[in-house]
């Protein structure tokens, strides 16, 4: 297993460790419910250095991004970021990602899922017909997500950038904890607010930043958070997890990502015609959110049925939601069965357990 620059710190703090995307990652420290509440109500620190980062540079960088992603990156100006996805030739999702505009029309950073780094790199590279300079900086880039309503307030003394007023999906570069050239981004995967910081682990930068964050943050209740709470937090918001809720077989329109699928942008992208046809003719299935009415926790791949016992779909994610004290899930169902308020039944150990379709976010 690979390690991040923070792996030994997680172990020293007593984290429960497990393999994730080929890395030895912390799953929990004090317990998922406690960590979840810490982020929702105060602030917590996630080590997500396993994520992938690609730099695209040169005159053709924007055009390349436009041809492989669904969103319209031409709308990005310096210091802005955008959620998007890569689509394959059959209309499925290669990956979801964030595009950062470092220098308009010329320099961009793409942040991709850890398990898809090689896959995404190869996919984008095959469309790089204009000699765009591509650099995979994943191995040398650290990423910490400091999330929660008090995150920016706690961390403001550590940086020369005004992070208290950093707007959602914008970023700034500056000094953080005495380390230069840190990219500070108002993004995250929790729905609780906060920032993410990207930096290179040179001259002990990782230790310096981690120690500074906890020196200032621990007295204010800031805690390290594992990937277990990251999953419950994103699920309460209805955020998709690649490999569970979206994958190579699900289209952005089916997965509720029509808002990042800009079919009107000038540059044609992979699968645009397929998605235009889907939009015109209508999709056959849809990603829905549901909460359990009767007792039971839905899990990935559990079958979803209607009241008559007919199979209408399957669960993609499920958990006991700490903020709600009830079980929730995501899943794909036939469009005719996707209306908000509809009753569905989750097949849990061969028993149909009642659930209700609800709106996102859950929390």
Image: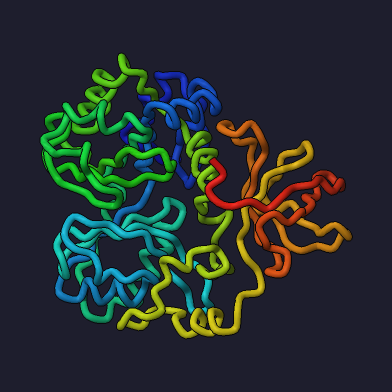
Left-right relation of 310 to 304 = right
Left-right relation of 47 to 180 = right
Residue 310 or residue 203, whichever sits in front: 310
Q: Is residue 266 above or below residue 328?
A: below
At which x and y percent is residue 58? 15, 70
The residue most toward the front is 341
Q: Is residue 308 above or below residue 141?
A: below
At which x and y percent is residue 34? 51, 23
Left-right relation of 3 to 55 = right
At which x and y percent is residue 295? 78, 36
Determine the residue positioned at 15% across, 38% down. 162
Determine the residue positioned at 72% across, 50% down. 356
The residue most toward the top is 219
Residue 47 or residue 336, whichever sits in front: 336
Determine the residue positioned at 30% across, 40% down. 195
Question: What number of labels is visible?
Answer: 0
Q: Is residue 97 above or below residue 323?
A: below
The answer to whether any part of residue 203 appears in the image is no
The answer to whether any part of residue 346 appears in the image is yes
The residue most toward the right is 308
Determine the residue positioned at 32% across, 38% down. 194
Quadrant of the snapshot with the N terminus: top left
Left-right relation of 210 to 103 = right
Q: For residue 49, which quarter of the picture? A: top left
Which color mode does the image show? rainbow
Residue 40 or residue 225, whichever sits in front: 40
At which x and y percent is residue 217? 29, 21
């Amino acid at each position: 297993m690979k390690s991040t620059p923070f792996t030994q710190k997680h172990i020293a703090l007593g984290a429960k460790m497990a393999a994730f995307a080929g890395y030895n990652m912390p799953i929990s420290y004090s317990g998922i419910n406690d960590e979840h509440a810490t982020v929702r109500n105060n602030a917590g620190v996630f080590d997500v250095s396993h994520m992938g980062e690609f730099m695209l540079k040169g005159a053709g960088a924007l055009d390349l991004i436009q041809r492989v992603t669904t969103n319209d990156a031409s709308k990005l100006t310096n210091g802005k970021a955008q959620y998007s996805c890569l689509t394959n030739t059959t209309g499925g999702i290669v990956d979801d990602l964030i595009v950062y505009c470092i220098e308009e029309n010329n320099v961009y950073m793409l942040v991709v899922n850890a398990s898809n780094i090689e896959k995404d790199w190869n996919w984008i590279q095959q469309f790089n017909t204009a000699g765009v300079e591509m650099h995979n900086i994943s191995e040398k880039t650290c990423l910490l997500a400091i999330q929660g309503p008090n995150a920016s307030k706690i961390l403001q003394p550590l940086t020369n950038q005004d992070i208290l007023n950093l707007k959602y999906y914008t970023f700034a570069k500056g000094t953080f904890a005495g380390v230069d050239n840190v990219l500070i981004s108002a993004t995250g995967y929790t729905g609780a607010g906060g920032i993410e910081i990207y930096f290179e682990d040179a001259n002990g930068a990782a230790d310096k930043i981690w120690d500074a964050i906890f020196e200032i943050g621990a007295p204010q209740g800031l805690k390290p958070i594992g990937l277990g709470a990251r999953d419950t937090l994103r699920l309460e918001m209805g955020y998709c997890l690649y490999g569970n809720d979206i994958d190579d077989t699900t289209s952005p329109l089916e997965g509720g990502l029509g808002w990042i699928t800009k079919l009107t942008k000038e540059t044609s992208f992979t699968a645009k015609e397929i998605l235009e046809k889907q939009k015109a003719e209508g999709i056959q299935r849809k990603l829905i959110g549901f909460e359990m009415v009767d007792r039971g926790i839905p899990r990935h791949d559990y079958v979803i049925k209607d009241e008559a016992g007919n199979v209408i779909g399957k669960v993609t994610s499920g958990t006991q939601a700490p903020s709600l004290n009830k079980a929730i899930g995501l899943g794909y169902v036939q469009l005719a069965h996707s209306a908000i308020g509809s009753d569905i039944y989750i097949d849990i150990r061969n028993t149909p357990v009642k659930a209700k379709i609800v709106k996102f976010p859950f929390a």
